[in-house]
Image: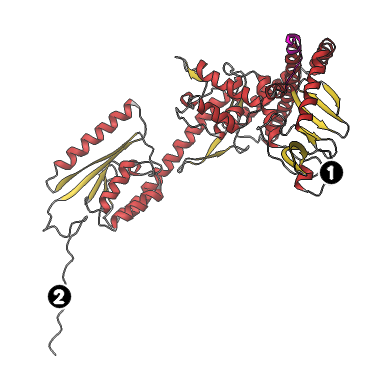
Amino acid sequence: MGTRNITVIPAKSRIGNTASAVQIPKLRVAAYCRVSTDSDEQATSYEAQVEHYTDFIKKNTEWEFAGIFADDGISGTNTKKREEFNRMIDECMAGNIDMIVTKSISRFARNTLDCLKYIRKLKEKNIPVYFEKESINTMDAKGEVLLTIMASLAQQESQSLSQNVKLGLQYRYQQGIVQINHNRFLGYTKDEEGHLVIEPNGAEVVKRIYREYLEGASLIEIARGLMADNILTSAGKEKWRQETIKKILKNEKYIGDALLQKTYTVDFLTKKRVKNDGIVPQYYVENNHDAIIPRDLYMQVQEEMERRSNIKSGNSGKKRIYSSKYALSTIVICGHCGDIFRRIHWNNHGCKSIVWRCVSRLDKTSVDCMARTIRETELHDAVIKAVNKVFGAKTEFINILEKNIALVMNQVDKNAIPEIDKKLEQLQKELFRLANNKEDYSILVDEIYRLRDEKEAAMTKNAGYASQKQRMVDMTKFLKLQKCIVEYYDEQLVRKLIKGITIYDEKITVTFKSGLIVDMEI
């Protein structure tokens, strides 16, 4: 056996997707540019970056220009929305780019995790990234160590910027400065000074939605009606969703108020926002702009929404689903067990008819209810007679209503809310003082929340009285204008006047929305 010789064969220098420098002497180099806003100043920076890196690559005789990938006006904390960045990575993975140059780590990514993820992904393909500002080449031995440090600093910078934005928003909230995206806010636009002003066409749609809801229409029925009339949403879409209608009905901005910070950002990297359930402060600004919907009408809608979502059986407590198909649906109540009556097609010994029956009997629940079954014709007849009884003695009922209006108005506490507001103002001033001095203010926070709850309860109570008064006023006007009796059962009239009907064995009690109660024998 001869002498064993060992010859070292040095590795070929290889960068990028090229097999060797002999085969393709020039590196295909691309540049990545990004600015984070759409302002004119940043736009200039964007254009300057594109021009700079085009020249930077082309003047290097060892490089071949592989293009500029530029994202304009997009935040760098996450790469999901950066279309050009993602396209550049895809080109690298496809073997079309050998090297990337960019201005700095903060331009490439402010998220350490994303930054290192893509650097390592590119290194697996032998593709370096050169950061001009930091003079870092990721293929150098010290590259990743420096990169980790610099990327962390970039992430801290992004977090600091996020905190500054939050502090700015908090200050504006405390001053009651309201910022609303009016482009998708049905019924409002902005004037030259940036103030919310009513947009007539959209406002009429909002009024229609509130009116139809109080007339008994369901969310899906309102949505279908709007689509049938070719009315577009605030986003300019043809399709109306139930959730969109619900948000309009619950939006306090339609009464001229604004609740600020309904949501908050939980992660500055992902920009994920969640509903604010008291985790961060909220600010309620009253009378911020002109109202489209009167406050008492808004409260009526909230009451009706609460009623519809909490329709339950009397004794069993089983939740029932609201139905708007018929005016009497969910408002006809059993006098025995308190459950609702349901409309059914009945076949009794070959005799077909439409009747209303207690659902406790239909569902065969544990409640042993023996409430009577009433034919729909009898029920309609009883409603007509109750309405005509009021019309026939309208002078008497008008006097009762006017007395009740006076009684209701005497119950309104006009001083409660101003007194609470005064206390809240004092506490908030003290809260800001303690917060600025970095002192404990937890006791003040608890008291502010207590007073806010007290104010909300007072507002709800007063709005309830105002709503009750308005229903009585509407009924009074209706009676004064009514010239003749009702001859036929009218669904719309029932929706307008009747609040509830209770079925007993020998009588039917009709309760009007104005508070009037009329008993009719069966």
Nearer mark to the viewer, of 2 and 1: 1
Nearer the observer, 337 or 167: 337
Snapshot colouring = secondary structure
Secondary structure, mark 1, is loop
Label 2: few (<14), some (14–19) or many (≥20) C-alpha neighbours in 10 Å: few
The x, y position of residue 463, in whole percent, is: 72, 21
The residue at which mark 1 appears reads as 369
Q: For residue 9, say whether it is visible.
A: yes
Residues at circles 2 and 1 in contact by the CB criterion of under 8 Å: no
| Outermost residue to the bottom | 1
The residue at which mark 2 appears reads as 7
In the picture, measured across the screen, residue 416 lies left or right of residue 90, that is right
The residue type indicated by label 2 comes to Thr
Measuring 29% from the left and 50% from the top, which residue is drawn there?
90
Measuring 43% from the left and 43% from the top, which residue is drawn there?
156
* Relative vertical location of residue 167 with respect to residue 470 in this rendering, above or below: below
Q: Quick check: is 478 in the magenta stretch? A: yes
- Name the quarter where the N terminus is drawn: bottom left
The residue type indicated by label 1 comes to Cys
Nearer the observer, 157 or 393: 393
Q: Which residues are magenta?
A: 477-488
Q: Quadrant of residue 351?
A: top right
* Relative vertical location of residue 53 with respect to residue 509 in this rendering, above or below: below
In the picture, measured across the screen, residue 24 lies left or right of residue 241, that is left
Q: Quick check: is 299 in the magenta stretch? A: no
Q: CA distance from mark 2 to mark 1?
A: 101 Å
In the picture, measured across the screen, residue 146 lies left or right of residue 472, that is left
Label 1: few (<14), some (14–19) or many (≥20) C-alpha neighbours in 10 Å: many
